[in-house]
Image (cartoon, coloured by chain):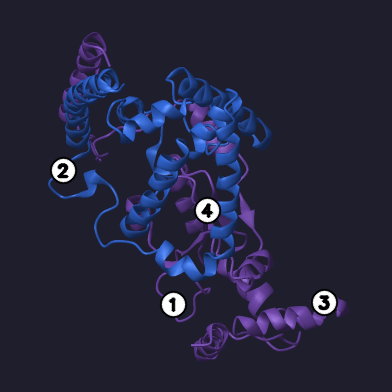
Amino acid sequence: MQNRTLIILTLVFLPLGLSAFFLEERPITDEDALMLSFTEFDELVEQKVRKISPLKLAKLLMEQNQNYFLLDLREAADYKIPTSENYDLNLIKQSKWRLNDNIILYSENEAEALQAYYLLMIRGFFKVTILSGGFEAWKKEVLFPQKSEIPAELLKEREKTSRFFGGELSDSNSSPPSAPNPIQLLKQKHQRHGC
Amino acid sequence: MFPLYEFQHIGDGIHLIFALIIGLAFGATLEQSGLGNPKKLTGQFLLHDMTVFKVMFTAIITAMTALFYLHYLGWIELSIIRFTASFPAPQFIGGLILGVGFMISGYCPGTAFIGAASGHKDGWFTIVGLFIGSFVFATSYTWLESFYSSRSPLPEFLYQFSMLTYGMTILIICSLALLCFFVVEKIENHFSLSRSELCKTEP
């Protein structure tokens, strides 16, 4: 390396290093305004919300696909979908997932999940999905599906899915229990992991 | 905003074209820097030609400052970029093995391709060795896995040490690089001079 090159490198990198030292990254605070044009806001609201059906989510869970974060936005409940973590909307705003992480949200119905969906989307997360129909739909389609509504050829498979998550097929004339027996689910998980 | 692929601005096919263009540019830059020449590469270990050190350290500080400023300007999202984590023990052993191979062949994996493309036969032999080594590693992976993935409790990045900030790390590494360039220049001059004197005295 000639002296001239060394001088050029010094003239380029020393000022860059010095200014990096003073230009510390400023954390985003509550005082920061969100600059969004009407067009951008319209686009965000009008774009189709990514949804996943309860049965598809159940399949993902049974395959032990760990490539996502499953967030439960309900108030703490006895039963939650396996692998999900309980979060409230304030925590969602502070969390530090990577912008391209797959995040699946569910709440009792879809309302809170949609709120969280927009809170995340506006912060730049772009792989956010909500559970279609919320936990109500999960109970209806995965935990306690009505026998009469399931085609005969799918009955065995649906029963297996339902039992896997601690539920059971329900008869049309009996009303389904409000929540599965959590002990039953715990036992099942215990067997799955073999520990 | 970058990275284009992660933000889905470009699709699955297009990102491969970008990879090809960047790969070609990388190869051309290495070749232009003289790293396709095994003599230059072994000169690094004999301390009379420090080109490898200078090229690599320049690349490191260029990429580092560019990422900092692009992130500062909001053009690139660093949280999405995958950086290789620190695995000190396996990286030390892997570095030793690579270094021995580097000294014997005069090539590292990337420069072996440059050497082969520039018409050096030894480049081809190094490439064959590279594939044999990869095959041996892959077949013994289950045996090596626990060591291969052993991590240290220390932070992965320099700026994660509590007394350092990101900007401070940039300044330290840039200053260190410039100091090192100055020192290696002296070392290079010293060893190439003693080498030429040695050549003169030989009958």
Q: Is residue B72 left or right of residue A122?
A: left
Q: Chain of mark 1?
A: A
Q: Classify 10 Å Cα crowding around label 4: few (below 14), some (14-19), many (20 and above).
A: some
Q: Classify 10 Å Cα crowding around label 3: few (below 14), some (14-19), many (20 and above).
A: few
The span from disc 3 to disc 2 (Cα, nearest Å) is 59 Å
The span from disc 4 to disc 1 (Cα, nearest Å) is 24 Å
Q: Colour of chain B?
A: blue
The answer to whether marks 3 and 4 mark residues whose Cβ atoms lie closer than 8 Å is no
- In depth, the one of B141 and B97 nearer the eye is B97
Q: Chain of mark 4?
A: A
Secondary element type, mark 4: loop
- In depth, the one of B32 and A154 nearer the eye is B32
The span from disc 1 to disc 2 (Cα, nearest Å) is 42 Å
Could one spot residue A112 in this view of the protein? yes
Q: Colour of chain A?
A: purple
Which residue is denoted by mark 3 in the rendering?
A: A154
Which residue is denoted by mark 1 in the rendering?
A: A77
- Residue name at image x 49 percent, y 79 percent: A79
Q: Chain of mark 3?
A: A
The span from disc 1 to disc 3 (Cα, nearest Å) is 30 Å
Could one spot residue B67 in this view of the protein? no
Which residue is denoted by mark 2 in the rendering?
A: B164
- Give amino acid for label 3: Leu
Above or below, A13 against A134 in this view is above
The answer to whether marks 1 and 2 mark residues whose Cβ atoms lie closer than 8 Å is no
- Give amino acid for label 4: Asn
Check chain identity for marks 1 and 3: say if they share one.
Answer: yes
Of the numbered discs 4 and 1, the one sitting upstream in the chain is 1
Q: Residue A102: which numbered mark, if any?
A: 4
Secondary element type, mark 1: loop
